[in-house]
């Protein structure tokens, strides 16, 4: 069974062809980042227009690379939400039109379930139950994946997402957008010598709050600048990253222990961060907890992960009703 998967929730136009359950035949990703970085962040109106320009080309390219035609496709999987409404609308409208024109069934897929499913591509032995940690520019979740389509949310961010806090700190340090990867590079040459806060909320909480940490770093930089003191950027990056790591490691390991899960599967753009991955892995070893991540190309937004999640959903619920709508605030 083959699915054509479409992802346009934010600033990447992506179309993939995936064979059930998790074999990726093609995964075309047209990034808009070069346009948005001039503005220091994603401009929603521009993002929607660029999706419209790119989507048909991506479709042709995805079919070509997979050596398939539309006649070979059994299912269309499209990101329904959460995300930017204008961006989502492009993908959902395109998928519905294609479905009506060809008679191929369409499923509206939750973007977060897609991120979780990205680990099935790179780690085919992964089976529920396990703990999923989704850390991206827009989201931070700890989820107990009880079955392939049964998710219990354990914790989430109350303010900034993990990647968002990396990007905001990077911006104040004059690093281009998005700055997470550059900040990690800088941190490698720094030391954790600045005492930035670790925000755990209450002792038993699995929720996150990164805005206080971000403000502490920004205040530190502004104060030192005002005093005319030189700033060691590597130390700022390292101290910030260690503060993020301490909190994430504490909460995700506690969640795995609480649910007695032996695997943690990390996904989302921030799962590219080796320091974060290694720290969770090291902390997990003590409790025989395995830590998995997708290959780098499946960590950020991509249609392949939507295809894998689409199969899971279709098997359980069948096709979506024709009047399903893009949902910018879609919950799990
Ligand atoms: O999943 P993604 O590509 O898009 C969203 O759905 O948000 O994640 C992008 C986010 C950005 O905030 C980016 O700075 C962050 O992931 N990121 C990183 C690293 N690589 C990407 N953050 C920290 N360390 C990295 N190595
Ligand atoms: Zn995403």
Image (cartoon, helix red, strand yellow):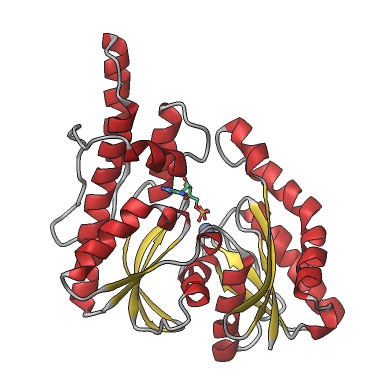
Q: Position of residue 195 (x, y in %)?
A: 17, 34
> Does residue 208 appear anywhere in the picture?
yes
Query: Which image quadrant is residue 41 in?
Result: top right
207 relative to 64 in the view: left or right: left
- Quadrant in the picture for the C terminus: bottom left
Q: Residue at x 42, y 66 (%)?
A: 293
80 relative to 217 in the view: left or right: right
> Does residue 206 appear anywhere in the picture?
no
- Quadrant in the picture for the N terminus: bottom right
Q: Residue at x 30, y 11 (%)?
A: 226
Q: 211 above or below 39? A: below
Residue positioned most to the left = 203
103 relative to 131 in the view: left or right: right
Q: Position of residue 300 (x, y in %)?
A: 53, 57
Q: 143 above or below 177? A: below
Q: Position of residue 56 (x, y in %)?
A: 82, 61
Q: Residue at x 55, y 33 (%)?
A: 40
Q: Residue at x 74, y 48 (%)?
A: 50
Query: Which image quadrant is residue 45 in?
Result: top right
Q: 273 above or below 145? A: above
Query: Which image quadrant is residue 259 in?
Result: bottom left
């Amino acid at each position: 069974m083959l699915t054509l998967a479409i992802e346009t929730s934010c600033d990447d136009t992506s179309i993939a062809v995936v064979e059930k359950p998790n074999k990726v035949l093609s995964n075309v990703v047209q990034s808009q980042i070069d346009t948005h970085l001039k503005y220091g962040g994603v401009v929603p109106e521009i993002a929607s227009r660029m999706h419209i320009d790119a989507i048909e080309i991506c479709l042709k390219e995805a079919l070509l690379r997979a050596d398939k035609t539309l006649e070979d496709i059994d299912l269309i999987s499209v990101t329904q939400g959460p995300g930017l409404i204008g961006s989502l609308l492009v993908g959902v409208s395109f998928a519905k039109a294609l479905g009506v024109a060809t008679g191929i069934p369409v499923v509206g897929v939750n973007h977060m379930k897609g991120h979780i499913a990205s680990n099935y591509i790179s780690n085919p032995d992964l089976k529920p139950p396990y703990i999923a940690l989704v850390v991206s520019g827009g989201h931070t979740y700890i989820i107990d994946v009880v079955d392939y389509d049964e998710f219990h949310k354990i914790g989430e961010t109350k303010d900034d997402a993990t990647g968002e806090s990396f990007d905001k700190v990077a911006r104040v340090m004059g690093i281009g957008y998005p700055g997470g990867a550059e900040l990690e590079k800088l941190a490698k040459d720094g030391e954790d010598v600045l005492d930035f806060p670790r925000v755990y909320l209450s002792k038993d909480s699995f929720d996150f709050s990164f805005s206080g940490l971000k403000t502490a770093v920004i205040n530190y930089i502004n104060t030192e600048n005002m005093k005319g003191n030189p700033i060691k950027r590597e130390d700022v990056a390292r101290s910030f990253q260690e503060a993020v790591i301490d909190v994430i490691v504490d909460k995700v390991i506690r969640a795995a222990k609480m649910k007695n899960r032996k695997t943690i599967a990390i996904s989302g753009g921030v799962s590219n961060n080796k320091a974060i991955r290694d720290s969770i892995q090291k902390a997990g070893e003590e409790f025989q907890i395995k830590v998995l991540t997708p290959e780098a190309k499946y960590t950020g937004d991509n249609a392949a992960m939507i295809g894998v999640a689409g199969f899971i959903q279709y098997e359980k619920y069948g096709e979506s009703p024709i009047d399903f709508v893009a949902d910018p605030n879609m919950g799990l």
